[in-house]
Image (spheres, grey):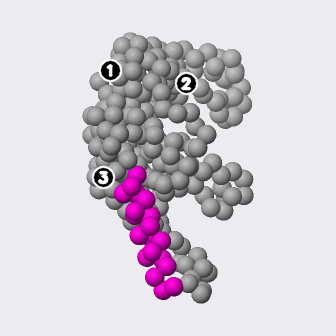
Amino acid sequence: EQAGEGPAVSAFLVATDVSEHADRALAHACALAKLLSARVELFSSAYIPPYLVAAVATGMSPNWLQEARDQAAHQLDALAARLGAEGVSVTTSSSTEEPATAICARSDEIAADLVATGTRGRTGVAHAVFGSVAERVARCAHSPVLTAHADSPKPGLYRRVLVPSDFSPDADLALAWARLLVEKTGGTLIVQHSCEIPPLLSGSAELTRAAIEKALESSAREKLERIRSS
């Protein structure tokens, strides 16, 4: 496919807690930053909920919380130094606010073109209780969001990029990013569309399921063809 003009890219925000869960998202973000000549800002939130502070503070030194945050800042600076030595243009910033809120706010402050964050892949009860910072960031950030977990593949050349699309403006933005990637890597762009027929329509006596499926397929093929030829 002939790629169209992609989005202008200059700044990535990479949220990290300097753990293995964040490492793979960081690796992908840095690979993309090099590919697109973008700068990277490493961001960490040294937030501890008040109830946890009260629970663990008994018997500890009065300065334990600040010491923990200083250690986190030292780790972030060390990571930035390593990435800088690898040719990544990198700065750092941090917050003591709730992580998802802080990440989204910082993204807006620097007008980030991309936010990258790791995910711990919680499921079931753990996900329901603790939620997911990555999920909340993906829902609330005004920038595109890249997520990865520790078992995600290492960065590659993005030879085959799949873009599920419902032909909405949000999907078009995702498509623009995918086109930018394949333009840089010479890869193949695959656009996929799927549609579930609402029960209200499929239950109508005047609209048979076969007729609805045919109309939806025809409309989708026309839109996919316009994407392919653009």
Looking at the image, which is closer to me, 221 or 139?
139
Q: Is residue 69 magenta?
A: yes
What is the chief secondary structure element of the magenta stretch? helix
Measured as percent of width and height from the top left, residue 125 is found at 72, 58
Measured as percent of width and height from the top left, residue 168 is found at 45, 33
Left or right position of 94 against 189? left
Q: Earlier in the sequence, mark 1 or mark 2?
A: 1
Instruction: Please report the bounds of the magenta region as a residue range.
Output: 61-79
Q: Count all numbered tags in the image, as a single digit.
A: 3
Q: Regarding mark 2 in the picture, which secondary structure is present there?
A: loop
Mark closer to the observer (1, 3): 3
Question: Which residue is identified by label 1?
Answer: 4
Q: Quadrant of residue 213?
A: top right
Question: Which residue is identified by label 3?
Answer: 91
Q: CA distance from mark 3 to mark 2?
A: 39 Å
Q: Is there CB contact under 8 Å for labels 1 and 3?
A: no
Q: Regarding mark 3 in the picture, which secondary structure is present there?
A: strand
Q: Earlier in the sequence, mark 1 or mark 3?
A: 1
Dot 2 alpha-carbon crowd within 10 angstroms: few under 14, some 14 to 19, many 20 or more:
some
Q: CA distance from mark 1 to mark 2?
A: 20 Å
Q: Earlier in the sequence, mark 3 or mark 2?
A: 3
Q: Quadrant of residue 74?
A: bottom left
Mark closer to the observer (1, 2): 1
Q: Amino acid at mark 2?
A: His
Question: Which residue is identified by label 2?
Answer: 193
Q: What residue is drawn where x is 59% and y is 87%?
A: 59
Q: Quadrant of residue 105?
A: bottom left
